[in-house]
Image: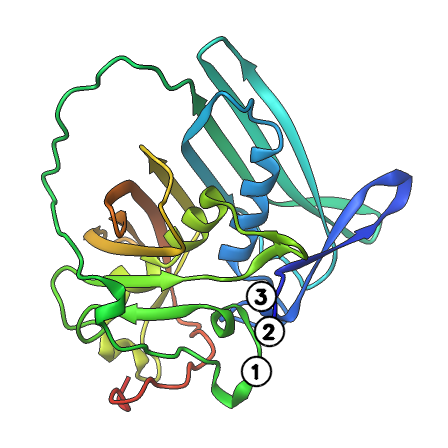
Amino acid sequence: MSAPALFLPQPGDDGRTLFAPADCARSVWSLDLVHGAAMAALLARGVEGAVRPELRVARLTIDLMRPAPMQPLEARTTVVREGRRIQVVQSGLFTTRGDETVELARATALALRPSDLRAGEPLDINAARPPDPESLPRRPANMAGGAEAYHSTVEWRPVGEWGASPRPMLWIRNPAQIVPGEPLSPLARAVATADSLSPLANWEPSRRREGAVSFINADITLYLHRESADEWLCVVATSRQGDVGFVVCEGALYDRRGPLGRIALASLAQTAQPLGLAPPPGEGGR
């Protein structure tokens, strides 16, 4: 059985290609919206289509400006800066509301040319080697009530009890395709996985109580110093600061070879709660 596709291409007006979100792209906040990780993956696809093959994306910033409805989206990509060793590319997702075209999200990518010049020995002040994901129990994160959404396609393996560690770690394997016949690229998989830093860093068991504050991220910034080795990626939450209605979270991204990149994002505090997830085995109080 092939992996599900997040988006289904369909013809639009004037020869444009639109991307209709599939059920497995639905958000945990509302089944009528597209998950931010799925939007980030589609934006990464647009970026990669414009970046020159001899360059490598070193930074990808996603601004999630508006909720994306479960309706066809248009992707537009522009090269902002073209240089011999550097390229800046922007990709946006748009939808139509009546007679108006609205931009929902935007990616800005900085691509650099690799070379044989040595960069020196690595310095990692937040070293935290996660255990191998195959050594950890699988913890399903299916939607309560059996609804299909983005979380239905993702395999989650937290390191220890969720919310109980001073440095939370979560292994994720996402086998989804971005469109039918096109698996997630290393860049698309990395930025979609980076989106999980917000719930990982902001999780506290008390926030499941009625009236508790929850957090939703408004952006994702990902720095990568190399491509991932396989489908397994681990997010390590390293910092969370803020007390004025939003927090800034930082984290590290790993694969089974070691450090892969860094993540930063800003999460807004709100009283709305995400749709309930079915609790994993052994964590009935979650």
Mark 2: which secondary structure? loop
Q: How far from the left and from the top, in percent, is residue 37? A: 49, 56
Q: For numbered disc 1, what is the local secondary structure?
A: loop
Instruction: Kindly identify the residue that appears in the image at 47 percent across and 22 percent down.
Output: 55
Q: Horizontal placement of 110 versus 254: left or right?
A: right
Residue at horizontal 57 percent and vertical 20 percent from the top: 80
Q: Alpha-carbon neighbours of circle 2 within 10 Å: few (<14), some, or many (≥20)?
A: some
Which disc, if any, is residue 3?
Answer: 3
- Percent across and percent down for residue 87 are 50, 19
In the rendered image, the quadrant that contains the N terminus is: bottom right
Depth-wise, is mark 3 or mark 2 nearer the camera?
3
Residue 27 point in image, percent of width and height? 54, 67
Would you say 128 lies left or right of 27 here? Answer: left
Mark closest to the chain's N terminus, 3 or 2: 3
Q: Residue at 28% x, 91% y: name it.
A: 284
The amino acid sitting under disc 3 is Ala
Instruction: Give the residue type at disc 2.
Output: Leu
| Residue reaching furthest to the right | 14
How many numbered discs?
3
User: Is the residue 192 above or below the residue 88 in the image?
Assistant: below
For the residues bearing labels 1 and 2, Cβ distance under 8 angstroms: yes
What residue sits right under mark 2 in the picture? 31
Residue 208, quarter of picture: bottom left
